[in-house]
């Protein structure tokens, strides 16, 4: 995948996570929502990929670890973006902006590294065909969730 496309997808994911977090109510309902989506995602991926019970037993710990690493990377990227934005808006010195810019570039490079790691780890537990199905399933699920949050507008009648 081209680096610019990865960056756009990362920002889209970051924006989605931040927008959902902003509208979610704190407390038990928030945690319940997150768990429901996670459960739906597990069921969706398991079905779409066609995981056997034996594969699922080996696959999900690897997937969950990668997801945790990805989320930490997305959060770090968001923090560094915010820091850079605040530095610019506050009229910080060039030296301070340079430090924030370097931190942002490191976070972005780290996120790109995280995006390239999964295939290597998944190859240990799934066939190439199932890895490909996994990537397709993740994208289908992501689009499904976006459509739930922001349903397509009906076309105007003429």
Image (cartoon, rainbow, N blue to C red):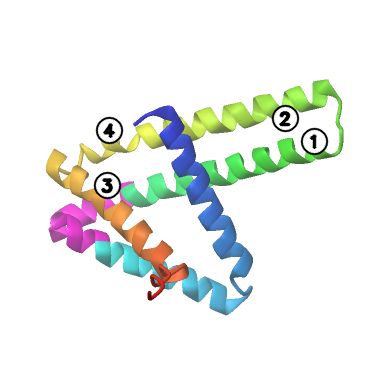
Q: Could you tell which of marks 1 and 3 lies nearer the N-terminus?
A: 1
Q: From the viewer's perspective, is 74 left or right of 120?
A: right
Which one is in front, 9 or 61? 9
Q: Which residues are magenta?
A: 45-62
Was residue 71 drawn as part of the magenta stretch in this picture?
no
Residue 100 occupies quadrant? top right
**What residue is shown with label 1?**
87
Q: From the viewer's perspective, is 98 left or right of 120?
A: right
Mark 3 Cα-neighbour bin, 10 Å: few <14, some 14–19, many ≥20? some
Residue at image location 25% in from the left, 40% down from the top: 122
Q: Which mark is residue 135?
A: 3
In three-dimensional space, the C-alpha distance between marks 4 and 3, rounded to whole angstroms, equals 13 Å
Which one is in front, 7 or 155? 155
**What residue is shown with label 4?**
120
**What residue is shown with label 2?**
100
Residue at image location 21% in from the left, 38% down from the top: 124
Give yes or no for contact between labels 4 and 1 (Cβ–Cβ under 8 Å).
Answer: no
Q: Position of residue 144 (x, y in %)?
A: 34, 64
Q: From the viewer's perspective, is 158 left or right of 121?
A: right
Q: Could you tell which of marks 4 and 1 lies nearer the N-terminus?
A: 1
């Amino acid at each position: 995948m081209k680096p610019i496309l990865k960056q756009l997808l990362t920002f889209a994911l970051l924006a989605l996570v931040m927008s959902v977090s902003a509208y979610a109510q704190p407390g038990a309902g928030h945690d319940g929502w997150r768990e429901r989506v996670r459960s739906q995602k597990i069921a969706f991926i398991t079905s779409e990929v066609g995981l056997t019970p034996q594969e699922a037993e080996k696959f999900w710990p690897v997937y969950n670890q990668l997801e945790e690493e990805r989320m930490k990377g997305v959060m770090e990227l968001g923090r560094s973006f915010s820091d850079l934005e605040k530095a610019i808006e506050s009229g910080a010195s060039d030296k301070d902006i340079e430090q924030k810019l370097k931190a942002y570039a490191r976070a972005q490079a780290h996120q790109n590294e995280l995006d390239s790691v999964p295939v290597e780890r998944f190859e240990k537990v799934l066939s190439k065909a199932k890895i490909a199905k996994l990537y397709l399933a993740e994208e289908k699920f992501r689009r499904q969730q976006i459509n739930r949050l922001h349903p397509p507008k009906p076309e105007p009648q003429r």
